[in-house]
């Protein structure tokens, strides 16, 4: 039994870790040093805000160190590293700034919004009414003028920017003022674009009028799986008081130590990393489009994020393609939304994007047998095993 379990993990590590090209935009890869901190002794420990547990003196310092780094990276007055995931960060925000019956305005899942925030997710749980941002599929973005009118009429209690399918900055600058004036809390769920924001290559929600930026730390941000909240002093201090014990009791201190190191990495290397992500996405999008893949937003340059969205028109077709390319060790989701964060972190640049586009073309357009392409995919992956944008060990 135990041997079987160990063998399964080893097989997974060999396959996903060394043989596959991972193009899932929700995923990334940690540096070896960050990964080591995840299995440090901190993984076994408790602390509590009321000082119930002894033995926490270094844990407390690690948390303060991480929060300080987060404040520096995101140029903000308050940071909290305790949310266990992006979803829990969303919950902390919505539960503290809305009450049952209030209206939440965000991107609908039909337009690439996060389903976990919508009716079946947090909005349903918290008994919120949902009102979708008017959305242009052609520009793949919120329509600011129409949204302004709805905000003035409906007066939502929370206006949350950010989405799961996001290729261009959202119009925070255009809408935050009117949302605030009409009594809304203005937030940005940066789960997907956190690494690009940290590297100053996307948009800067906290300077554009958002009260808080929050979300995952493991998509374009290359930390351990988890969540983070960044906010101005007033909102940050308010939230800090409310996280324990309702949303997080014991935080995961190993993750927080690992996140602190990832923050140090992104502080040092974030600009170069995020710049290369955008270059890689644009190179990949153009090459795929040249091969007649239906990449969205060609007139706008396809993308300014870590995502390239290929619109196959229906989910079943997307799934069939995702399954086909998986047989060649290329991992994507079923949308098909292609992400460049992990391959960028492994040091790939525009030339490698052209090779990836060619693999995808051979599999999808030429319908070449996946096992014919697989060896070349694995060979390319094996040339890029070293993790870049981190400190030399
Ligand atoms: C926009 C957005 N917010 C939140 C989440 C939830 O993040 P996590 O998986 O860290 O809970 C996701 C997940 O994919 C997401 O796309």
Image (cartoon, rainbow, N blue to C red):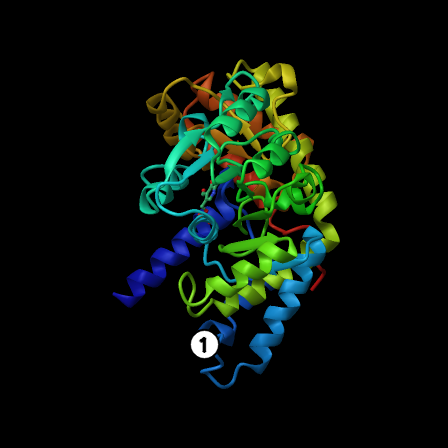
Q: Position of residue 149 (x, y in %)?
A: 53, 23
In the picture of the structure, the residue carrying the numbered disc 1 is 46
Residue at x-position 50% and y-position 74%:
42
Residue at the left extreme, as displayed: 1
Q: Is residue 376 or residue 75 the one in the foreground? A: 75
Q: Is residue 213 above or below residue 53?
A: above
Residue sticking out furthest to the bottom: 54
Q: Give residue 326's position: percent from left, percent from top.
A: 41, 34
Which quarter of the rendered picture does the N terminus lie within? bottom left
Number of callouts: 1
Work out whether residue 274 or residue 83 is closer to the camera in this orientation and state it: 83
Secondary structure, mark 1, is: loop
Does mark 1 have its CB less than 8 Å from ligand 1?
no
Task: Using residue 107 as the reference point, say whether residue 267 is left or right of it.
Answer: right
Check the image and report above or below for 123 versus 81: above
Query: Would you say 169 lies left or right of 332 here?
Result: right
Q: Report if residue 343 is visible in the image.
A: yes
x and y, in percent, of residue 82 in the image: 51, 62
> The C terminus lies in which quarter of the figure?
bottom right
10 Å neighbourhood of mark 1: few (<14), some, or many (≥20)? some
Query: To which quarter of the image does residue 172 belong?
Result: top right
């Amino acid at each position: 039994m135990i041997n079987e379990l160990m063998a399964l993990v080893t097989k997974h590590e060999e396959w996903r870790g060394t043989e596959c090209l991972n193009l899932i935009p929700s995923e990334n890869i940690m540096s070896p040093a960050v990964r080591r901190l995840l299995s440090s002794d901190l993984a076994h420990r408790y602390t509590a805000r009321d000082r119930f547990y002894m033995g926490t003196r270094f844990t407390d310092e690690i948390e303060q160190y991480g929060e300080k780094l987060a404040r520096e990276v995101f140029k903000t007055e308050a940071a909290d590293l305790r949310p266990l995931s992006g979803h829990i960060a969303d919950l902390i925000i919505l539960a503290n700034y809305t009450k049952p019956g209030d209206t939440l305005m965000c991107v609908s899942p039909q337009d690439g919004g996060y389903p976990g925030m919508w009716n079946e997710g947090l909005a349903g749980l918290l008994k919120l009414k949902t009102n979708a941002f008017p959305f242009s599929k052609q520009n793949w973005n919120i329509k600011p003028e129409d949204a302004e009118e709805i905000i003035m009429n409906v007066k939502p209690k929370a206006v949350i920017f950010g989405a799961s399918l996001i290729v261009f900055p959202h119009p925070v600058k255009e809408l935050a003022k009117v949302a605030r004036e009409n009594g809304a809390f203005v937030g940005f769920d940066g789960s997907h674009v956190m690494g690009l924001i940290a590297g100053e290559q996307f948009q800067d929600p906290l300077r554009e009028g958002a009260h808080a930026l929050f979300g995952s730390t493991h998509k374009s941000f290359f930390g351990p799986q988890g969540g983070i909240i960044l906010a101005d002093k007033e909102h940050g201090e308010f939230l800090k008081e409310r996280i324990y014990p309702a949303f997080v009791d014991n935080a995961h201190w190993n993750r927080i130590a690992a996140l602190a190191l990832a923050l140090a990495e992104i502080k040092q290397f974030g600009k170069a990393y995020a710049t290369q992500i955008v270059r890689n996405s644009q190179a990949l999008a153009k090459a795929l489009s040249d091969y007649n893949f239906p990449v969205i937003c060609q007139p706008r340059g396809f993308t300014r994020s870590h995502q390239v969205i290929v619109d196959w028109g229906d989910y079943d077709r997307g799934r069939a393609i995702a399954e086909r390319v998986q047989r060649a060790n290329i991992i994507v989701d079923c949308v098909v939304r292609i992400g460049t964060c992990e391959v960028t972190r492994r040091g790939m640049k525009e030339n490698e994007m052209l090779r990836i586009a060619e693999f995808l073309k051979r599999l999808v357009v030429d319908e070449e047998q996946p096992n014919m392409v697989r060896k070349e995919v694995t060979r390319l992956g094996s040339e890029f095993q070293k993790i870049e944008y981190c400190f030399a060990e």
